[in-house]
Amino acid sequence: MRLLKVATCNLNQWAMDFDCNMKNIKESISRAKEAGAVIRLGPELEITGYGCEDHFLELDTVNHAWDCLKELLVDDWTDGILCSFGMPVIKGSERYNCQVLCLNRKIVMIRPKMWLANDGNYRELRWFTAWKQKGPLEDFLLPSDISEAILQTTVPFGYGYIQFLDVAIAAEVCEELFSPMPPHAELALNGVEVFLNASGSHHQLRKLDIRLRAFIGATNTRGGVYMYSNQQGCDGSRLYYDGCSCIVVNGDVVAQGSQFSLKDVEMVVAQVDLDAVASLRGSISSFQEQASCKPKVSSIEVPYRLCESFTLQMLLSSPLKIKYHSPEEEIAFGPGCWMWDYLRRSGASGFLLPLSGGADSSSVAAIVGCMCQLVVKAISEGDEQVKADAIRIGHYTDGQFPTDSKEFAKRIFYTVFMGSENSSNATRTRAKVLAEEIGSWHLDVSIDGVVSALLSLFKTLTGKQPRYKVDGGSNIENLGLQNIQARIRMVLAFMLASLLPWVHNKPGFYLVLGSSNVDEGLRGYLTKYDCSSADINPIGSISKQDLRRFLKWAAVDLGFSSLKEIESAPPTAELEPIRSDYSQLDEVDMGMTYEELSVYGRLRKIFRCGPVSMFKNLCYKWGTKLTPAEVAEKVKYFFKYYSINRHKMTVLTPSYHAESYSPEDNRFDLRQFLYNARWPYQFRKIDELVTQLDGDRVAIANEASGLRSDGGMGVVAAGSGNPSVGL
């Protein structure tokens, strides 16, 4: 038996904070050595942090990375352990995203990334060049200061693998695993047994299974040990890197790290038997045949042994059951961990949330409550970094630290109910009860005086007094009166966030939390510069349907029982007067349901549908309950208001990315914000299709009627009664 102990890790790196990143890297190497591992894998671009974006274009960033690598090489960090470090490297005139493999204070190989991630939230081609050569490895001339420090002039650079005396090892970087022809397939045929995948993969609801299936598939039919390392945390942007570093052997997961955690460093270690890999490959005839005529991949020979022989003292890692979180848990833990990183790294003293008592703001409050629970739990488990951060943020003295989540919430979390004459007692009470359950410092404020002052000023300027629709006013007046209330709440929120710490003799400032969901952003059902405008928004990329399921879960699992009543209440903005015969409802205002919005959003973004193709798809999906003309009206209505309100996405509060159909304009969903909202060409095409479909329906109905009149009892023409026939 060739036994090999390997270690991978989740690291909470911070883009451009080299001190933070080096501290975590060194801690991970120390722990790997303590565990007896001889291979240590870290995340993609771990030295700089993955999210440096245009900072990668600065020579300083590359130079700092080399300085950090030199620091790791001149000391004993790589003694007796193969370490894979992620950093940018410039070769000639090109900048590459590289894995630098080091052993015993030398650089063994530099492996540039071959297939770059360049869709969704990823823009790697903006900063890096893909390595396209598959020929012999090239000599890379090391920077002079590195060369002098480690007494090494050149290093092999390119696509290849390292052949040790007892094992062959190769790197496969993040996106390469998901490419149509992943490198590991060819490398396996060349005898590579251990694959090192350094990644910078962000969280998205229900995404983890896709990732794990890729690791399992990579080794299930080819054999091998697949090691995966990922960042974990907020490294300075909208993304939360969700860890879950793991080790897979011959299709079985034998070690798995956490997906959500407050830890800065988490190690995943496994003891594997490489002979099991050789045995599996030898038993697969097709593998043997393809390996016999494989294209040769370049390699480097290193006269060094990594494996140990069989001994009873060394236990092999066994397959384990994969840990998945439910979507409700993902909504709680992902944004909760992201907000903790943002809070501790921003210098803020806490959060302030306008809490309306509705589903969205209550979801945000519950996530903050969950964050406080995670902090207290981490401290109880001995996490000294979380403890130090909590003491600093909560302003604890005399050796005190958080031991109760509600007490901690009281120190760092303000909630404010900003009521008006249009607010109901029910929402006011719900907000108060939820704040008590979480432990926040809660305020109940009336904004009527400020609204009246502004309306008085408007009347003085114009001589006119706007009225609500229910009082005989026009739609313009009605919307204007609602917007005044909404925007006053934003101004008040930021004022309280900056001054309340001063009132309570606390240093610093509070971060204002937004609470608009992804569906409202897509439809534009929010006031520009209202309470949706904040410092950060933990639910801005989560659908209303998922949030309602989360509220039900949190009422039980987080212990905030009032959320059950909040979830069951119909969504309302409470910006119009309540009358005995009228109560404002969100779905009535929008002219569509939240369920329909989710469908539109997925078709528009995930399936890349314009108006015409969306109409065709929905004729299939809704054809049993709606006519083509009714489907057409719904599609036109959505695209009209989507395009009218698209400009609001340009000022959308930075939101935690969680949903694949997010309309976030900064980098994920890049589209114009000035549209011809009439969509004349596309809507005309839809009208033509409706006319054609109506004609088909009539013809099918006549044919069916003719069959019945001819005695064809019980015979129905295929597709009759289905309004989508002909599509």
Image (cartoon, rainbow, N blue to C red):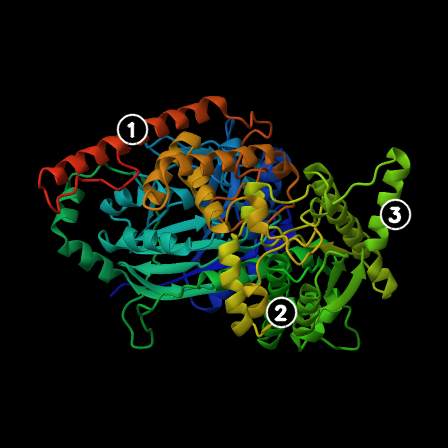
Q: Which residue is mark 3?
A: 453
User: Could you give the CA–CA distance between mark 3 and mark 1, rounded to whole angstroms?
Assistant: 59 Å
Q: Is residue 652 visible?
A: yes
Question: Which labelled disc corresponds to residue 375?
Answer: 2
User: Could you give the CA–CA distance between mark 3 and mark 2, rounded to whole angstroms?
Assistant: 43 Å
Going by the numbered disc 2, the residue's amino acid type is Val
Q: Position of residue 92 (x, y in %)?
A: 50, 27
Q: Residue at x 54, y 63 (%)?
A: 332
Going by the numbered disc 1, the residue's amino acid type is Gly
Q: Secondary structure at mark 2?
A: helix
Marks counted in the figure total 3
As rendered, which of 414 and 436 lies closer to the eye? 436
User: Could you give the CA–CA distance between mark 1 and mark 2, rounded to whole angstroms?
Assistant: 64 Å
As rendered, which of 546 and 482 lies closer to the eye? 482
Please determine whether, in this image, residue 166 is positioned above or below residue 649. Answer: below
**Which callout, 1 or 2, points at the residue further toward the start of the chain?**
2
Q: Is residue 57 left or right of residue 123?
A: right
Question: Which labelled disc corresponds to residue 695?
Answer: 1
Going by the numbered disc 3, the residue's amino acid type is Ala
* The C terminus sits in image quarter: top left
